[in-house]
Image (cartoon, rainbow, N blue to C red):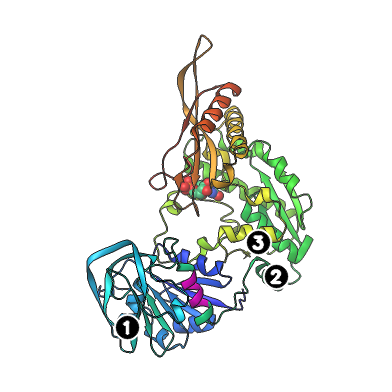
Amino acid sequence: MQHGERILILDFGSQYTQLIARRIRELGVYSEIKPYTIGLDAIRALAPQGIILSGGPSSVYADDAPLPEAGILELDVPLLGICYGLQVLAFQLGGRVDPAGRREYGRAALQVDRDTDLFYGIENGSQVWMSHGDHLTRLPHDFEVIGHTANAPIAAISSRSSKIFGLQFHPEVVHTESGRDILSNFVFRICGCTGDWNAASFVETAVEDVRSALGGERAICALSGGVDSTVAAYLVGRAIGHRLTCIFVDTGMLRLNEAQQVCDSYRNAPFDFIFVDASRRFLEKLQGIVDPERKRKIIGEEFIRVFEEQANQLGRIRYLVQGTLYPDVIESVSTRGPSATIKSHHNVGGLPEKMGLSLIEPLRELFKDEVRRVGSELRIDECILKRHPFPGPGLAVRILGDITREKLDVLRAADDIFIQELRQSDQYDRIWQAFAVLLPIQTVGVMGDERTYENVVALRAVTSLDGMTADWASIPNDILAHVSNRIINEIKGVNRVVYDISSKPPSTIEWE
Ligand code: XMP
């Protein structure tokens, strides 16, 4: 996509790299992450207004230390090194980096030594966040110290003659009180950006891009009713209208009344919409299947079959719209958590190759919260934009063991009560994802004077930023008690409810 202004972030493996990009975007400037190995020609082609070198776990003196191309120092583009990024810049310019006598993690008070440029308007004594083992012990030629802390005599540096800066602390984390202002100084005062990137300008450019990519062609899209595919479809719908056909497949693994709700929500959508009730096919294929990965595979394959049948009836179509997001496309050197390889997340993977389709991915530069803002800009119902993520295989991976119609009914009812109560008590929007799980065990209970031997339902609710890591959500006890009471009283066949208090890692969000 064409961007008026952009800040390039070179990733050296910091856990905070994505956070830097988000902070810059919050300032209204598009920013993009590339591996530190990116070549000079590729950087020139991106024509960034400024470059930020991220932190990272390495030491510049290690044999395999990640180093950027030395030529970036001569690009005549403002540079800001953060933590390892500062050490790399200083090292390449002839400074000296040593292991710190004492590693420094956590808060420190910043003393500003020069308040022009990077520290313009930054107050003395504000809290900054440190996280480093090595530190700078000798400045490169022509550099000066612009900030220090009690433990770090060199906490921030600046070149006297060119626009090169370095920070030993992390301006991107919220614990650095003036972090936003420091990044803002870099982006606006030093790089000269104007900050014209927002949801409205994104929509305008994306619609133009889709139009020119598709020419007069038609496209199809697999809608799930979730945020990503819906926003992608509305965006492409705005660009090409009814030349886009969206297909929504009921796999039989959806939640209570979900198929109907999803169909209703697309009633006035700017594209053609096809609903396929394939629930019986899926249920038959899943009969007796217990292994989670087999369930995923079967659902993935059957989905492709159903989709293909529908698409073939539409005639020759060459483009497939997908709601791929930025975290899935960043060629990051950071470790991205284990989940991607632990479960095969199918979505509609496999479709493009099989059907000879080219992909249109209008959201591939956006983070999830940005997608929601774009969705608002496109006037998509808040209800859809705030929906919790829902896995492609749906309830199939929330019924442990084999899947039957009866179990699906029990789980749907329990899940619905949980979600209703979370909405009623204003908990829903602060939670990343919440759902019920049906366990393949019976436990003993007593109801009236009768002994019962019935199913257990587990409740799962997590907070998260991106689903890669998550913490179990702390929900007030009285709400949990009420949910449990309702589930056991209202659903025949359940006599016990438990709450999952595991974080990810080491657990995952879904139980299968
Ligand atoms: P886990 O369970 O791996 O889930 O912690 C992380 C996020 O991914 C969703 N998820 C899936 N999404 N197909 C999908 O489209 C899948 O097979 C799948 N498995 C998990 C999960 O709901 C959570 O949001």
Q: Secondary structure at mark 2?
A: helix
Q: Quadrant of residue 379?
A: bottom right
Q: CA distance from mark 1 to mark 2?
A: 41 Å
Label 2 crowd (10 A; few <14 / some 14-19 / many >=20): few
Residue 434, image x, y percentages: 54, 41
Q: Amino acid at mark 1?
A: Gln
Q: CA distance from mark 2 to mark 3?
A: 10 Å
From this viewpoint, is residue 67 visible?
Answer: no
Label 1 crowd (10 A; few <14 / some 14-19 / many >=20): some
Residue 246, image x, y percentages: 71, 54
First in residue order: circle 2 vs circle 3: 2
Q: Residue furthest top?
A: 449
Give the residue drawn at x 55%, y 28%: 482
Q: Secondary structure at mark 3?
A: helix
Q: Amino acid at mark 3?
A: Val
What's the magenta region? Answer: 181-187
> Which residue is the site of mark 3?
374
> Which residue is the site of mark 2?
204
Instruction: Name the residue nearer the viewer: 499 or 298.
Output: 499
Give the residue drawn at x 49%, y 44%: 462
Instruction: Name the residue nearer the viewer: 360 or 380.
Output: 380
Type of secondary structure dominating the magenta stretch: helix
Q: CA distance from mark 3 to mark 1?
A: 41 Å
Residue 182 placement, left or right of 483: left
Give the residue drawn at x 67%, y 46%: 249
Residue 205 on the magenta segment? no
Residue 156, image x, y percentages: 36, 76
From this viewpoint, is residue 346 visible?
Answer: yes
Instruction: Name the residue nearer the viewer: 432 or 224.
Output: 432
> Which residue is the site of mark 1?
92
Q: Which mark is residue 224?
A: none
**Above or below: residue 191 compared with residue 374:** below
